[in-house]
Image (cartoon, rainbow, N blue to C red):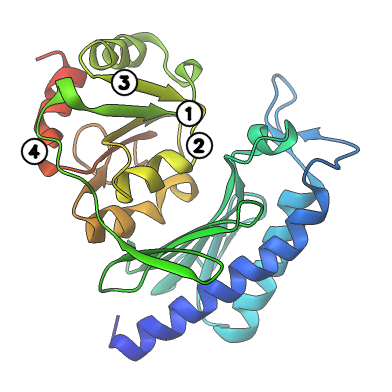
Amino acid sequence: MADMRDLQQAVNLMHRLADAAAAAVLPHFRKLDTVDSKDDAGFDPVTVADRGAEKVMRSLIEEVFPEDGIIGEEFGMMRPEAERVWVLDPIDGTRAFITGLPSWGTLIALMERGEPVAGMMSQPFVGERFWTEGNGVFWARGEEREALSARPCPSLAEATLFATTPAMFNGARKAAFERLAAQVKTVRYGTDCYGYAMVAAGHGDIVVEADVQLYDVAPFVPMLAEAGGALTSWDGGRAAEDGTALAVGDPQLFEQVRAVLAGR
């Protein structure tokens, strides 16, 4: 970004977007009448809450930064070639949302020249918010606020591993994940976006996922970096570029995890 003033404007808008999304989503949590599917051959749930939250966020971005691009899960791309692009996932973890579990969150990222530079995860039912400000990653709930950092964990044998579901792994990726799961101390499933946030907050060590999109992980790229960790694809490239994501809190784990995933 050009300067800290630009960054602060972006952070201020992220908070406004999260507030607007919360107002659109919370009236429907645990009160849904219908759930639609975006996949005729399977089940890819979407709700009135997903669509409503993305609409209000897109409208607010258009009002404040009309030249910026937008990439959203529900309504696609607008000006994706712009220098600054907002990436929106109104409800990451829709399966959790429709079953009443509070592991979902609203994800907001700002990309500049193709790279995520700021990110936020908001969970309005729990009341938590995680975000970056260019000088760290922060957590707030009500009047509480803390600066976060990832925890040291140089050994796989002591690590906690997160993944949303083992069903996201197939074929060689399934075998790779199972090799890794066998070498860590603890594996936790059903985490959705919370897994990445918990690594940044120092409560876990690794997230390994497949079948992910840019909007699933973009906010956590700067969040993990500012917490002292990293978020890439399994092969060390850009997160989600091949549908995979690998987050570590301790950089010493990075090559260890990659080696296991690659079968080395």
Q: Report whether 203 appears left or right of 254.
A: right
Badge nearest the viewer, 3 or 4: 3
For label 2, the crowd category at 10 Å Cα-Cα, with few meaning under 14, some 14 to 19 and many 20 or more, is many
For label 3, the crowd category at 10 Å Cα-Cα, with few meaning under 14, some 14 to 19 and many 20 or more, is some
Lower sequence index among marks 1 and 2: 1
Identity of the amino acid at label 4?
Gln
Q: From mark 3 to mark 1, how far is it between C-alphas?
A: 14 Å
Lower sequence index among marks 3 and 2: 3
Q: Report whether 10 appears left or right of 137.
A: right
158 versus 225 height, above or below? above
Identity of the amino acid at label 1?
Thr
Relative depth, front residue between 20 and 109: 20
* Label number found at residue 245: none
Residue at image location 25% in from the left, 73% down from the top: 135
For mark 2, what is the residue?
192
Identity of the amino acid at label 3?
Thr
95 versus 60 height, above or below? above
For mark 1, what is the residue?
164
For mark 4, what is the residue?
252
Q: From mark 1 to mark 2, how far is it between C-alphas?
A: 5 Å
Q: From mark 2 to mark 4, how far is it between C-alphas?
A: 24 Å
Percent position (x, y) of residue 196? Answer: 38, 43
Is there a contact, CB below 8 Å, between mark 1 and mark 2? yes
Q: Report whether 92 appears left or right of 211.
A: right
Relative depth, front residue between 7 and 161: 161
Q: Kindly indicate the quadrant of the structure image that contains residue 153.
A: top left
Lower sequence index among marks 3 and 1: 1
Lower sequence index among marks 2 and 4: 2
| Helix, strand or loop at mark 1 | loop
* Label number found at residue 186: 3
Identity of the amino acid at label 2?
Asp
